[in-house]
Amino acid sequence: MVPWIDSKPVLLQKATTRLMVLTTQRPSLPSFVQSHYALTILERSHMVNCKSMSTPLDIKLQPFVSAPSLADPSYYRGIVGALQYITLTRPDLSYRVNYVSQFMHAPTTAHLKLIHRILQYLKGTLSTGLHLTSNTSLTLSGFSEVDWAACPTTRRSTTGYCIFLGSNLISWCAKKQHTISRSSTEAEYRAMSHTTTELTWLSYLLSDLHIYGSPSPTLYCDNISALYLTINPVFHVRSKHIELDYHYVYERVARGLLVTKHIPSTHHVADLFSKSVPKATLA
């Protein structure tokens, strides 16, 4: 889908010029900000004069009660499609846009309210973007988190991870898991597996570019049971319900290609990609 709410085809060149604005105050501190594109979304959704909100979604999402379907779902789908592109420089919106994307097939008025809440948050954060720095190390580190059985409809868990090159955020993901996890450890281990795959790919990419940092990337997780599974094969007997392909993490650790460490939940930056967070976390 092209990034216009009316879903009309446009030239790729024209679309690209509106997706991202690169502003560089200093060569060593580039900033990627899509303020113009965000304003375009607000204009086309008739939300330019809306009241801004400090958070894009409520902290506790409740199951949806019966609500009437939208007479014209293309309006909802167009806004969601446009918001997909703004997550290129707005990691704080990744989980929220992913969440509302799950109702594209049959949106209701309740779902539309969620969209308006995101747009109100966007209105108050037009200048927010992705900021990088050259004054940092070349060490890869990943943060893996999961919101266990978070979906009130399917009870599937939500995986969230983010990866840093030094202090620069270079990769992130917010995605519902494909299967239901019967324990938080199972869900966390699945999330660690997805993060490990991304860390491995980025390691190969940096190596091909002749960029060398630490020999082994570090993966942080706040679930101690899941961390034990990566280093102690005795625990595997108790977790055979976890598919074998997820033991890919254990193999990487055993070969010295990955280091796993515990991080307190209060310091976990990946919470932003797996659940709704309070205003203080977004600041």
Image (cartoon, rainbow, N blue to C red):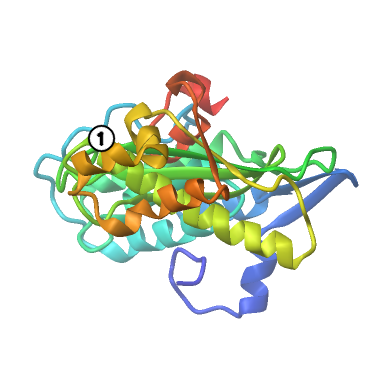
Quadrant where the N terminus sits is: bottom left
Q: Position of residue 44 (x, y in %)?
A: 49, 57
Q: Position of residue 274 (x, y in %)?
A: 39, 39
Q: Residue at x 63, y 46 (%)?
A: 216
Name above or below for residue 251 compared with residue 148.
below
Task: Quickly name the residue at label 1.
Answer: 184
Name above or below for residue 222 compared with residue 112.
above
Name above or below for residue 6 compared with residue 180.
below
Q: Residues within 10 Å of mark 1 (few under 14, many from 20)?
A: some
Q: Residue at x 14, y 45 (%)?
A: 153
Q: Position of residue 64 (x, y in %)?
A: 16, 40
Residue 97 visible to the viewer: no
Q: Looking at this view, is 144 or 12 the one in front?
A: 144
The amino acid type of the residue labelled 1 equals: Ser
Outermost residue, right side: 27
Q: Residue at x 28, y 36 (%)?
A: 185
Q: Position of residue 175 (x, y in %)?
A: 37, 51
Residue 15 shown left or right of residue 55 in the figure: right
Residue 148 shown left or right of residue 141 in the figure: left
Outermost residue, left side: 66
Q: Quadrant of the rendered structure where residue 59 is?
A: top left
Say which element carries label 1: helix
